[in-house]
């Protein structure tokens, strides 16, 4: 099974060689590497050309600066793999990461989207592991809770991979200028909204570098930036709802029923199930008795999840 590793780079020349080396040293052999340089002004081009000249598995692509989402769109267009792995040019893959991830996809044909635990290193050193009950957790579907509450079920870019058939449903992703940074949010939300089944690997398998010049990590969000981001999210969700011809039209009893069915798929954590229980907290179309029954069912699921 061929996999594609899509490395997006903008002025990370200082980290590029180490990042690419972490992919070249993978224990899984069948890999193509696509490096999309997003108009860097440092030494990135020289380094990428040198790396590509010495290794035929590397495909370089140089484009004008357009932001992270535009780099994602370009990388997916160039990729040939059955599974797409995403990697920021300042992060590292652990040596057996792709082998472990591919094993999850092979052992679980229903898995459309996988994210893994990670290790933060550099200015911060700690492991980040979500509280799911098993080493490999089938989280089921999260489309409705994502649409109603913008729930984020995923991890940073370098810990994400996606099966090609799901990716082809929503790539290329529109609104590139809205997502010059934090484009991993689009991957996480759209994988849910397009009914992808999500899995989680609770073994730290990538290293997320904290170096003080991260595009998002460590930056305090201003009120203006938050309002702009909320607008960008609203545009993305409205566009997706129209493409799917579905979510806008689920109301009242049917929304409760759909959320309950979704909450019962996979092995969701009690923390995530509590977010389900809050929906639809302000939906006036739902009778009080229906709300009570719905919340009671979710409470049972929470109790079951807390025992595992």
Image (cartoon, rainbow, N blue to C red):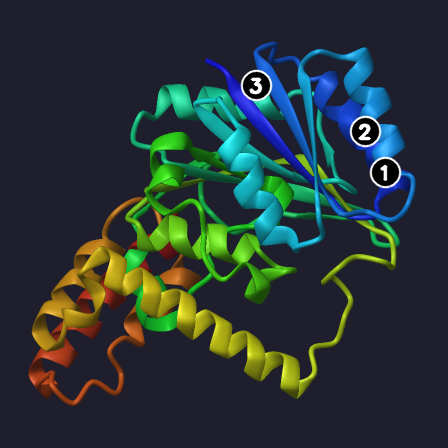
**Residue 116 showing in the rendered view:** no
Q: Considering the numbered disc 2 on the image, is that residue within a helix, a strand or a loop?
A: helix
Q: Secondary structure at mark 1?
A: helix
Tag on residue 44? Answer: 1
Instruction: Categorize mark 3 by other alpha carbons within 10 Å: few (<14), some (14-19), many (20+).
Output: some
- 46, above or below 227, in the image: above
Marks 3, 2: nearer the viewer = 2
Q: Residue at x 77, y 19 (%)?
A: 52
In the rendered image, residue 243, in percent from the top left (x then y), is placed at: 26, 57
* Mark linked to residue 99: 3
Q: Is residue 258 above or below residue 289?
A: above
Label 3: state its secondary structure.
helix
Does label 3 or label 1 sit earlier along the sequence?
Answer: 1
Kindly indicate whether the residue at mark 2 contacts the one at mark 1 (C-beta within 8 angstroms): yes
Q: Which residue is found at the position 80% from the left and 23% from the top?
A: 21
Depth check, front residue: 274 or 58: 58
Cα–Cα gap, marks 3 and 1: 28 Å
* Residue at the spot 8% in from the left edge and 73% down from the top edge: 253
Q: Position of residue 140 (x, y in %)?
A: 31, 45
In this view, the mark in front (3 or 1): 1
Residue 120 in view of the camera: yes
Above-or-below relation of 247 to 92: below
Name the image quarter holding residue 181: bottom right
Mark 2, other Cα within 10 Å: few <14 / some 14–19 / many ≥20: many
Work out whether residue 278 or residue 246 is closer to the camera in this orientation and state it.
Answer: 246
Label drawn at residue 48: 2
Crowding at mark 1 (Cα within 10 Å: few <14, some 14-19, many 20+) = many
Q: Are marks 3 and 2 in contact (CB under 8 Å)?
A: no
Disc on the earlier residue, 3 or 2: 2
Instruction: Say left or right for 201 vs 43.
Output: left
- Mark linked to residue 308: none
Q: CA distance from mark 1 to mark 2?
A: 6 Å
């Amino acid at each position: 099974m061929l996999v594609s590793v899509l490395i997006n780079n903008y002025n990370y020349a200082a980290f590029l060689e180490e990042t690419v080396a972490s992919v070249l040293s993978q224990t899984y052999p069948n890999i193509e590497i696509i490096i999309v340089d997003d108009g860097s002004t440092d030494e990135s081009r020289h380094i990428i050309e040198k790396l590509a000249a010495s290794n035929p598995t590397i495909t370089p692509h140089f484009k004008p600066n357009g932001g992270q989402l535009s780099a994602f769109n370009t990388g997916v267009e160039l990729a040939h793999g059955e599974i797409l792995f995403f990697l920021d040019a300042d992060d590292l893959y652990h040596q057996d990461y792709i082998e472990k991830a591919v094993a999850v996809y092979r052992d679980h044909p229903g898995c459309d989207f996988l994210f893994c635990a990670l290790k933060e290193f550099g200015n911060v050193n700690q492991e980040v592991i979500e509280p799911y009950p098993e080493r490999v957790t089938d989280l089921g579907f999260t489309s409705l809770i994502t649409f109603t509450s913008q729930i984020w079920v995923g991890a940073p870019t370098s810990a994400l991979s996606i099966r090609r058939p799901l990716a082809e449903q929503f790539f290329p992703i529109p609104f590139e200028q809205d997502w010059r940074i934090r484009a991993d949010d689009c991957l996480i939300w759209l994988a849910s909204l397009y009914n992808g089944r999500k899995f989680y690997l609770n073994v730290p398998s990538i290293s997320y570098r904290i170096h003080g010049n991260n595009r998002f990590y460590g930056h305090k969000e201003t009120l203006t930036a938050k309002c702009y981001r909320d607008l960008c999210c609203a545009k993305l969700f409205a566009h997706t709802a129209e493409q799917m011809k579905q979510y806008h039209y689920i109301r009242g009893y049917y929304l409760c029923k759909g959320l309950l069915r979704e909450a019962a798929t996979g092995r969701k954590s009690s923390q995530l199930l509590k977010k389900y229980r809050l929906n639809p907290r302000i939906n006036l179309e739902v009778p009080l008795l229906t709300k009570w029954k719905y919340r009671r069912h979710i409470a049972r699921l929470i109790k079951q999840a807390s025992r595992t």
